[in-house]
Each structure stands twice: as structure tokens, then as C-alpha cells.
Amino acid sequence: MTADVPKRLVSILADGGERLLKLQAESVSSALTTQMRAIEPPQTVAEAMSALWQLPQLYGALLEEMAEHARQSYHIMSQVQNELVDLACDSVVQQAPVLTEALSSGNVLFADRRHRSVVINFPDRRGMIARSRSQSA
């Protein structure tokens, strides 16, 4: 199962990225087709110049659509994040027996080493240095 974790991780991220890209494409397509079609096509230069004054009537619908797409983007990202957390937690749970075995064997080795350890009696180097100085003086 641990070998499958990287594949699943990439799959979750790729699917989430694909859904976000699709939503962005839909947003742009909708803004260019639906919203811009509401503006009357200009027949003269004067009408073309007045087209700018028609744009504010589109703002309300455009902002509603943008808010809805932002909401959907948040839900997609939230879902991807939840799937990644689930994957990470499942991976940790699957590794628990291996980790438990490693920790328990490490504890046994540590306890055995502490049980067998012997205190080594090093000579007092400071005392030796002081004695050698007093003898040479």
C-alpha cells in the first residue's frame, strides 16, 4: 500500500487541478459569450464608443457569476485538501506496526546497553596538571 501512496497523491492533485482548470475555462467562456452578447453590436463608430457605457449593466451579473465560481473553486480546493489529509492519515496508520516494532526494538537495545554499561574511571586530569606544576615549581 505504501508504494501506492505517491500514485494516489499525484492522482488527487491532478484531478483537483483539472477540475479547477475546467472551472476557469467555463468562467472565461461564460464571461466572453453570455455577458458580452448582452451588449448590442455596434453599427457605427459612435455606437462602438457608446458600448463602453453599456458595460456597467453587466457588472451585477458578472460579479454574481464570479462569486459563484470563487465558491466552487474553494469547494474544489477544500475537497482536494480533505483527500490529501485522508491519504496522509491512512498512510500513517498503515505504518504504525513498522514504527512500533522499530521503537520497541530500539528501546530493548537501549535498555540492554544501559544495563551492560560500566562506569569508566578516568583520572582527574586537572589534579594531575596541578600536581605536575607544583612539582616542577
Image (cartoon, rainbow, N blue to C red):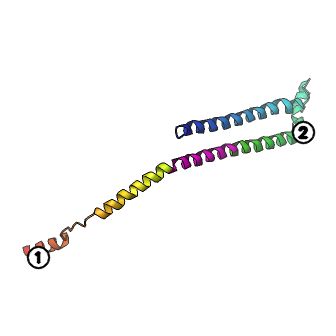
Rendered-image quadrant of the C terminus: bottom left
Q: The residue under label 1 is which amino acid type?
A: Ser
Query: Is residue 92 located in the magenta-colored stretch of the structure?
Result: yes
Q: Which residues are magenta?
A: 79-96
Check disc 1: other Cα within 10 Å, few if <14, some if 14-19, many if 20+.
few
- Give above or below for 53 relative to 109: above
Residue position for label 2: 57
SS class of the residue under badge 2? helix
Residue 44 in the image: x percent, y percent? Answer: 91, 24
Residue depicted at x 78% and y 35%: 27
Tell me the distance, in whole angstroms, between the alpha carbons under discs 2 and 1. Answer: 101 Å
Q: Is residue 7 left or right of residue 99?
A: right
Seen as rendered, the residue at the extreme left is 136
Residue drawn at x 54%, y 49% as measured from the top left? 92
Determine whether, in the image, residue 18 is placed left or right of residue 8: right
Foreground residue among 37 and 135: 135
Which residue is found at the position 77% from the left and 32% from the top? 26
- From the image, tell me which residue sits under label 1: 134
Q: Is residue 137 visible?
A: no
Residue 110 vs 20, above or below: the answer is: below
Q: Residue furthest top?
A: 43
- Between 137 and 26, the one lying in front of the other is 26
The secondary structure that most of the magenta stretch takes on is helix
Kind of residue at disc 2:
Gln
Dot 2: within a 10 Å radius of its alpha carbon, few (fewer than 14), some, or many (20 or more) residues? Answer: few
Give the residue displayed 89% in from the left and 36% down from the top: 53
Mark 2 or 1, which is nearer the eye? Answer: 1
Whichever of labels 2 and 1 marks the residue nearer the N terminus, that label is: 2
